[in-house]
Image (tube, coloured by chain):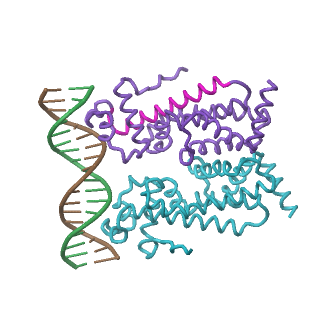
Chain colours: A purple, B cyan, C green, D brown
Amino acid sequence: MSLAPLRTFADTPRIAEFIDAAARLIAQQGYDRTSVRDIARAINLSSGTMFYHFKTKDDLLEAVISKGINDGVAHLTEAYRSAKGGALHRFLALITAHLGLIHGELRHVHRVWIREWDRLSPDARLRLRPQAEQYRALLDNLLLALTADGHLKTDPATARHLLLPALNWTTAWADLPDEASRASLGEQICAAILNQPVAAFHALLRAEADGS
Amino acid sequence: MSLAPLRTFADTPRIAEFIDAAARLIAQQGYDRTSVRDIARAINLSSGTMFYHFKTKDDLLEAVISKGINDGVAHLTEAYRSAKGGALHRFLALITAHLGLIHGELRHVHRVWIREWDRLSPDARLRLRPQAEQYRALLDNLLLALTADGHLKTDPATARHLLLPALNWTTAWADLPDEASRASLGEQICAAILNQPVAAFHALLRAEADGS
DNA sequence: GTCTATAGGAGGATAGAC
DNA sequence: GTCTATCCTCCTATAGAC
């Protein structure tokens, strides 16, 4: 059975501009406080123009969140795919990539996804949920591998329920402008999930590298 | 140096009614989508009446969040104070109480606090922040005790950064209508923070009880 | 495709009667 | 204290010119 092709939404450069401007403003102010006029003005267009490209303001929100999900899954899949080494190394790479997603260039679309998800219509949520689930599956694979290697002793599903909200909430207390600061916090978080001091986590990484 | 007395906001029964109705509606729909007319109608009053009791709609939001913080801190302080046994038992009691806060009768005010905090004016945030910090201090004490007892091996601050968002996010995926279901998830989460299977966490609890 | 102009409605807040 | 009536602003969305 083949899947229907995903709607990409960014069919034209103009549409991509609207999605981008909307993501920035909605991430900052919230959906309800961001008017169509605000968004159009940000790219030097007038509000009527938006309704030529999108049927409603809600459709624009769906397009922003769809981009947030697709770009996010692509970012993490790429990090997962290209990570070298064993489960522990891939775990650290994925967590660091997730921090990069939240604090890097994709941060606006990601934030809109997280903050405004439940403002979507039920229909829109149904359309987007399968894409969002890929995100979870990636992490679950890795947590199972950590269990198999004896590093994760607790229930993987509960570990995921600790991890994802904690990562997404880092925007509230951590400023991570560069790759180095993300890698550093990534190590702290990986160590915390394994209930180890950071130094011990480093030792585990070395041991994994030597053993493989 | 003595602190100024805290504004309680619920100075009259009518004000308490407004706070209660606002909490329910805002928790459900969000602040921006909840009109003053909605809130007043919920307690069979007209919208003008709200502006007799509160200067602005924003003041009402501040009152709701202030109640969320005060009731929440009181709830957790009481749970902490009355918990029996060692650090592990008090940890479980506090986590379970937190789940009770989020899923029980105080859930509406708590949810408004978490979801609408950054819609407060900077002034209001400054006023309320000291109260919110008490919340954190309570948990930090406990995590330090767990470190002293050798159960928590990772940095306590990072453990808190895992724990609090995860607890608050449980509303998105867990339905915990009664005390038993909260106690059960509480054990899972405590075990996950210590990176132990639930059965091993039970064994640690028994060992602590026997040793004291 | 983009603009201007505007319809049509909802929102926060105020005034004054009771 | 509460109500009704209303002001004024802002919003989404549409119509029609260019």
* Residue B46 position within the rendered picture, expressed as x and y whole percent measured from the top left: 31, 67
Q: Is residue B89 left or right of residue A178?
A: right
Figure label count: 0
Q: Is residue A96 left or right of residue A120?
A: right
Q: Is residue A34 left or right of residue B175?
A: left
Residue A55 falls within the magenta-colored stretch: yes
Quadrant hosting residue B102: bottom right
For the residue pair A120 and A175, the one nearer the viewer reads as A175
Q: Quadrant of the N terminus of chain A?
A: top right
Residue A117 falls within the magenta-colored stretch: no
| Residue located at (37% from left, 71% from top) | B53
| Residue located at (53% from left, 32% from top) | A72
In the image, is residue B176 above or below residue A111?
Answer: below
In the image, is residue B120 above or below residue B12?
Answer: above
Q: Quadrant of the C terminus of chain A?
A: top right
In the image, is residue B30 above or below residue A188?
Answer: below
Q: Residue furthest front?
A: B1
Q: Is residue A203 left or right of residue B60?
A: right
**Looking at the magenta stretch, what is its main secondary structure?**
helix
Read off the magenta span.
A54-83
* Residue B196 position within the rendered picture, expressed as x and y whole percent measured from the top left: 77, 46
Q: Residue furthest top?
A: A2
Quadrant hosting residue B210: bottom right
* Residue A85 position within the rendered picture, expressed as x and y whole percent measured from the top left: 72, 25
In the image, is residue B112 above or below residue B1?
Answer: above
* Residue C5 position within the rendered picture, expressed as x and y whole percent measured from the top left: 14, 40
